[in-house]
Amino acid sequence: MLVVAGEESLEPCTSAYDRRVAGVVSGAGAYRPGILLDRRERESGRLPVALVGKVYCRVEADFGAVAVGDLLTTSSTPGHAMKATDPARTPGAVLGTGAVLGKALRAVPEGRQLIPILVSLQ
């Protein structure tokens, strides 16, 4: 899970409910990027970022088990998503200004797993 770090740069998330959420590095598991935008000649460190669609994401359940369909947000575990449980910290689900990344397509009852999610920045 990536957040906006500065001008034209992204970095792995490191805090929960980060409103700078930008997307997920694409290409893990069985899903490959469908469309690549902003193509440039090979630059060091550039990776495809999913802004919408199905993609695999590292999700952790240390702060609560994740069920299929749960909203996901940034976690304090670097580069991971977690279940969004605090409506006061995820107003974007309603107003379009919060830290919701999308929905879980597989459960994570405990620990950390790489699971498919539906990216839908809100």
Image: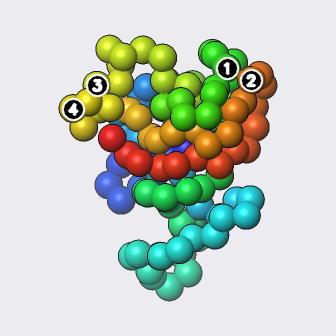
Any part of residue 26 in sight: yes
Secondary structure found at label 4? helix
- Going from N to C along the chain, the mark reached first, 2 or 4, is 4
Q: Residue at x 73, y 44 (%)?
A: 114
Report the quarter where the N terminus lies. top right
The residue pinned by badge 4 equals 95
Q: Residue at x 63, y 69 (%)?
A: 32
The residue pinned by badge 1 equals 65
Q: Residue at x 38, y 46 (%)?
A: 121
Gap between marks 3 and 4, in whole Å? 6 Å
Q: Which mark is residue 122?
A: none
Gap between marks 3 and 2, in whole Å? 25 Å
Q: Name the foreground residue: 75 vs 109.
A: 109
Picture quarter containing residue 96? Answer: top left
Q: Name the foreground residue: 45 vs 24.
A: 24
Q: Amino acid at mark 2?
A: Pro
Front label number (3 vs 2)? 2
**Residue 30 pos. (x, y %):** 73, 64
Q: Amino acid at mark 3?
A: Pro
